[in-house]
């Protein structure tokens, strides 16, 4: 946790009162080992960041918030992700949220094991919690909204019925490398399941204006590919901005 | 497994004979669902890649190897990694190996929990297995050698006693971004533990010619940071080569 995130509703007169059992109280006491007078990085969900000073640490944990700094802008990247293996899902959401992606769209795909859709890890509260942990890790106040789509074609028809604005990308081994394709933002990046998209899915994405891209020669696991793709897009964004 | 890796000693007269219990036999039969006549991507550790044709699939699994293609060159990157939490260690080794890093150097550091050094996951055979799985995932025949160093200072004294040749990097949040620093290969990249290097460690690395670099604003977990750093270095290498 590199940033203690509080809800706007928790901030009253510049103070936040937390009580056990609260994950944040537990973390601040056992990992950060706060005392009265400790100052920690804090932020309001969707808002500013700054410092929280511990002014009471007994039955209640009271933080005096001093929030004056803009949080890092979310990336102009929507991640469209074929639902990964449940034990990997939480980690992938956390990683994507730590980068500050704008939103995460989970979708079924041909090579997604049907059992994955019934996983308790796909419950909205579990996903939202993973996104929050990721934001705290990445020190951003943006918690990406996450939606789940049990049918890829319906998702495409609804969101991307035809080629249109924005840079649309689909990760696919052997395709041209990212920097040959990416020229602008916002970006929609589709990453397939282990084993990849099937050709029919790739063709449909292409019909809807998605350009196939690869990250290089290595074939990466989904969790590694998500981090690698976001890292390369962030770097390309910096190079474009120069 | 995107590439079936065999040892040079297993290749006799262009054929490889595998028997249960062998992890590869199990994987080829249950996941890839091979039959006689199936052709799969294969390679020899440290050598060429090509195709393996299944010519017998009973008590023995016999593969006729046709290996004529150069494997992807290993990256000119040595990863120096503070020993991560054991449950993360195997995944990080796999990810780094899937990128094709040249070698992996694991080291103790101030913020590495002392218990990590006693983890069975640090046993050489376990690490080598993770590196092999990573190479199979990344479809490379290079399995990075891995060494373990219980004292960071001894490692630095032995390998990097003073500034010298090669691009030496230490990941450190808030430092200049990679592309402002990296100009050449080979690269040695040092990534710290959760919580980061302590300042004294950073200072020592700098004395030995390591330049602090960051990947951007977000603070990433070690496993995400390793993938992100390697991905950005691979991209910078491609851009330099143009």
Image (cartoon, coloured by chain):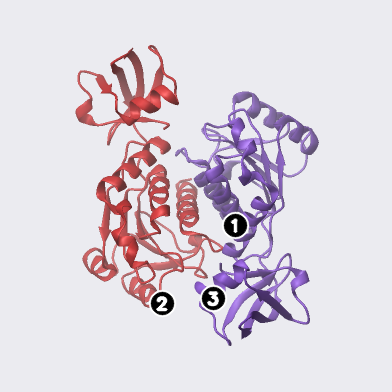
Chain colours: A purple, B red
Determine which residue is flagged by label 2.
B199
Residue that numbered label 1 is attached to = A99
Dot 3: chain letter = A
Front position in the image: B86 or A69: B86
What residue is rendered at 28% in x and 33% in y? B47
Return the x and y of residue A7 as percentages of the image width and height: 73, 68
Q: Secondary structure at mark 2?
A: helix
Q: Quadrant of the N terminus of chain B?
A: top left
In the rendered structure, find residue A29 and report the number of the disc placed on it: 3
Q: Residue at x 24, y 31 (%)?
A: B7
Q: Is residue B174 above or below residue A125?
A: below
* Disc 1: CA contacts within 10 A as few (<14), some (14-19) or many (>=20): many
Of residues B18 and B21, the one drawn nearer to the viewer in this rendering: B21
Front: mark 1 or 3? 3
Residue B35, percent from left and from top = 40, 14
Please tell me if label 2 and label 1 are on a single chain: no
- The tag earlier along the polypeptide, 1 or 3, is 3
Crowd class of label 2 (few under 14; some 14 to 19; many from 20; radius 10 Å) = few
In the foreground, B62 or A171: B62
Q: CA distance from mark 2 to mark 1?
A: 25 Å
């Amino acid at each position: 946790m590199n940033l203690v995130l509080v809800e706007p509703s928790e901030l009253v007169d510049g103070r936040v009162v937390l009580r056990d059992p609260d994950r944040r109280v537990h973390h601040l006491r056992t990992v950060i080992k706060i005392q009265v007078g400790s100052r920690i990085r804090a932020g309001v969900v969707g808002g500013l960041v700054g410092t929280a000073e511990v002014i009471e640490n007994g039955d209640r944990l009271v933080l005096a918030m001093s929030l004056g700094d803009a949080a890092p802008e979310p990336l102009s990247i929507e991640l469209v992700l074929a639902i990964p293996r449940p034990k990997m899902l939480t980690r992938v959401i956390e990683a994507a949220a730590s980068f500050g992606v704008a939103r995460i769209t989970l979708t079924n795909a041909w090579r997604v094991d049907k059992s994955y859709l019934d996983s308790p890890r796909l419950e909205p509260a579990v996903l939202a919690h993973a996104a929050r942990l990721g934001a705290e890790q990445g020190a951003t106040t943006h918690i990406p909204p996450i939606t789940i789509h049990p049918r890829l074609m319906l998702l495409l028809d609804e969101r991307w019925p035809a080629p249109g604005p924005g840079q649309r990308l689909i990760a696919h081994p052997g395709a041209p490398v990212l920097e040959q394709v990416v020229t602008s933002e916002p970006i929609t990046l589709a990453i397939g399941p282990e084993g990849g998209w099937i050709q029919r899915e790739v063709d449909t994405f292409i019909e809807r204006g998605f350009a196939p891209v690869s990250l290089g020669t290595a074939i990466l696991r989904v969790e590694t590919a998500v981090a690698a793709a976001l890292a390369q897009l962030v770097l390309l964004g910096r190079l474009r901005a120069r």
